[in-house]
Image (cartoon, grey):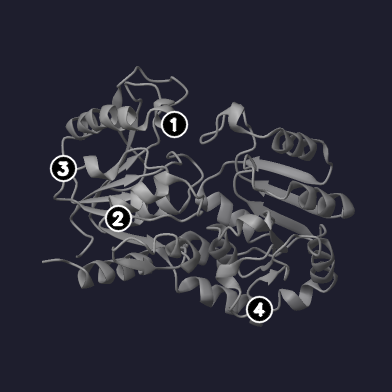
């Protein structure tokens, strides 16, 4: 199946906004090759819309529109009265289809929560379920898989969660936008070392203790953060869903003299910022074993990466990412960080930078879409 000239619905838990994640980048790349893409936001829980309201709005990206909407029924029914929630949501999906005015050829869901159940979209559409995080161990993940035609994911660990489902499955790496692969660094000013991190700080799976230990032990180094940090106005999280530890972490960052919080930015601004860094940092609680989208964006800059353990990169060239070896915790990360910055010229040598960029270049979103096209063609029932 070729993914061009199609009407494609993308379902996402993360809304369309300034700072983009994998599902946003896939939407943009699919639009570039002539598909008409409708990016369906998570239902409005901030009560900005009237009950049952659906709006389709153009974006700055070619052939991509965003669908903003609010359920006519209370969202909490999803957790208390699942059957009733699904029944009422089926009518809401009909309203979305009517408002969009076009039937999808492909429904591509990144939502492990099955908020808009795939089974209520037209039977004629190919339904792709693509979990890129997790597994989280809840029933909605299974329902999403059950209602899909194919399952695509970024690690064998996630795919193994769905081994009981007789569906075609395909493992693909995370993607990277061309803006990160094409970023060009300017001559660095002699203003000391700089460490960068991109991604929402309003996450409850960050290893905040390790983050703060590293920052406080290196007050002579500037740490720059790109991503959400205003938990009262988050594009994704409601204030009541953010843990107190996360709130304390963000408030502490604001007080530290060597921390710069940039907030959400465009991909172009992010790429321009990351390439000016000396070190790029990933610091999540290892028990989640997250395989994060930012890795390839980091690698695309060529700069040295210090990270918690990530199973998806354990067998790759060890000079791509300098990971904590322990699967139990990040206790060794501060020492690993000190080792890297102690010989930063070596770790950011031209050879190492080139190898990182070449690795990332294999997984541009356009290349990944071609791989998924081939997979769909190989499993086309026609």
**Given contact means CB atoms under 8 Å apart, are the residues at marks 1 and 4 in contact?**
no
**Comparing marks 1 and 3, which lies closer to the viewer?**
1
**Comparing marks 2 and 3, which lies closer to the viewer?**
2
Viewport quadrant of the C terminus: bottom left
Q: Earlier in the sequence, mark 4 or mark 2?
A: 2
Q: Earlier in the sequence, mark 4 or mark 3?
A: 3
C-alpha distance separating marks 4 and 2:
33 Å
Asked whether, in this view, residue 245 is left or right of residue 122, the answer is right
Q: Could you tell me which secondary element the residue under label 4 belongs to?
A: loop
**Comparing marks 4 and 2, which lies closer to the viewer?**
2
Residue 125: where, in percent of width, then height? 18, 51
Q: Could you tell me which secondary element the residue under label 3 belongs to?
A: loop
Q: Is residue 159 above or below residue 51?
A: below
Q: Could you tell me which secondary element the residue under label 2 belongs to?
A: strand
Q: Earlier in the sequence, mark 2 or mark 3?
A: 3
Q: Is residue 109 above or below residue 306?
A: above
C-alpha distance separating marks 2 and 3:
16 Å
Residue linked to disc 3 = 103
Q: Which mark is residue 79?
A: 1
Of residue 238 and residue 59, the one placed in the foreground of this image is 238
Q: Earlier in the sequence, mark 2 or mark 1?
A: 1
Of residue 237 and residue 328, the one placed in the foreground of this image is 328
């Amino acid at each position: 199946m070729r993914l061009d000239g199609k009407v494609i619905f993308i379902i996402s838990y993360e809304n369309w906004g300034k700072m983009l994640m994998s599902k946003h980048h896939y939407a943009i790349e699919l639009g570039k090759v002539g598909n008409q893409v409708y990016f369906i936001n998570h239902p409005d829980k901030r009560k900005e819309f009237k009950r049952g309201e659906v709006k389709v709005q153009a974006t700055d990206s070619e052939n991509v529109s965003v669908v903003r909407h609010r359920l006519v029924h209370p969202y909490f029914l999803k957790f208390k009265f699942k059957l009733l929630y699904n029944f009422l949501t089926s009518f809401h999906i009909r309203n979305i289809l009517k408002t969009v005015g076009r039937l999808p050829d492909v429904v591509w869901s990144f939502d492990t929560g099955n908020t808009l159940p795939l089974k209520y979209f037209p039977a004629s559409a190919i339904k792709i379920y693509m979990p890129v995080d997790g597994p989280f161990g809840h029933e909605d993940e299974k329902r999403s898989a059950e209602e899909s035609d194919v399952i695509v994911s970024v690690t064998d660990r996630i795919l193994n969660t769905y081994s009981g489902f007789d569906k075609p499955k395909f493992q693909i790496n995370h993607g990277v936008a061309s803006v990160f692969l094409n970023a060009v660094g300017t001559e660095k000013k002699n203003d000391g070392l700089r460490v960068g991190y991109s991604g929402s700080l309003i996450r409850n799976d960050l290893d905040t203790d390790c983050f703060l230990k590293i920052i406080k032990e290196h007050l002579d180094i500037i740490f720059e953060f790109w991503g959400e940090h205003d938990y009262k106005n988050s594009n994704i999280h409601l204030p009541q869903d953010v843990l107190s530890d996360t709130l304390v972490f963000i408030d502490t960052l604001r007080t530290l003299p060597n921390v710069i919080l940039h907030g959400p930015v465009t991909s172009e601004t992010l790429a321009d910022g990351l390439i000016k860094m000396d070190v790029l940092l990933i610091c999540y609680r290892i028990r989640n074993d997250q395989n994060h989208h930012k890795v390839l964006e980091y690698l695309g800059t060529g700069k040295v990466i210090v990270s918690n353990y990530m199973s998806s990169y354990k067998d790759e060239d060890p000079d791509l990412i300098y990971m904590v070896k322990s699967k139990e915790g990040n206790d060794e990360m501060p020492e690993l960080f000190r080792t890297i910055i102690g010989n930063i010229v070596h770790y950011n040598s031209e050879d190492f930078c080139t190898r990182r960029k070449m690795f990332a270049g294999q997984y541009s979103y356009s290349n990944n879409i071609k791989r998924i096209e081939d997979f769909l063609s190989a499993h086309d029932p026609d």
